[in-house]
Image: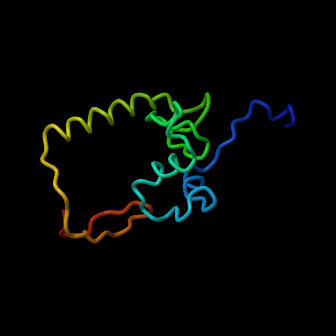
Amino acid sequence: MDKAYHDYNRGGSAWGIHHDEELYPNGNTFKPFRFVLLHKDEGIRDSADAHTLIPSSQNHVPFGIGKLSCPGTQFAAVVTKVFLAYLAMNYDLEEVHEKPRFLSLGHLPVPAIGQS
């Protein structure tokens, strides 16, 4: 790299990485166990990285990576754990037998009007 550009920040698209067909086949399809299966296929299950909440892969960058990553990453992980514990302790969760219709708002799926 040219020394003139050494201290410049370079950005990338997390959305582009997370939807790259070479990294994640069918990237636009909702697969809730996508990363569990990736860990199993890549043999990561036995490594120290298998049990972390914060990913350290350059292929999954929800909070950035390296020294410029989001300083709130650990906080977000703890808040997520607290929220899930609260949800499990205070609500009765049950299986939904019919699939609700969803509309798309950009990249965000939202329930159709009249559904909760």
Residue at 39% of width from left, 28% of height from top? 75
| Quadrant location of the C terminus in the rendered image | bottom left
Q: Quadrant of residue 81?
A: top left
Q: Find residue 31 and report its horizontal and vertical position in percent.
A: 42, 59
Left or right: 66 in relation to 6: left
Looking at the image, which residue sits at the far right? 2
Count of numbered labels shown in the rendering: 0
Q: How is the image coloured?
A: rainbow
Rendered position, 49 above or below 97: above
Left or right: 44 in relation to 36: right
Left or right: 65 in relation to 101: right
Q: Find residue 79 and report its horizontal and vertical position in percent.
A: 32, 32
Residue at 34% of width from left, 70% of height from top? 103
Taking depth in this image into account, of 76 and 46 the one nearest to the observer is: 46
Taking depth in this image into account, of 12 and 24 the one nearest to the observer is: 24
Taking depth in this image into account, of 1 and 59 the one nearest to the observer is: 59
Q: Find residue 57 and report its horizontal and vertical position in percent.
A: 58, 40
Q: Quadrant of residue 21?
A: bottom right
Residue at 86% of width from left, 31% of height from top? 3
| Quadrant location of the N terminus in the rendered image | top right
Q: Find residue 56 and report its horizontal and vertical position in percent.
A: 56, 36
Rendered position, 41 above or below 108: above
Residue at 41% of width from left, 53% of height from top? 33
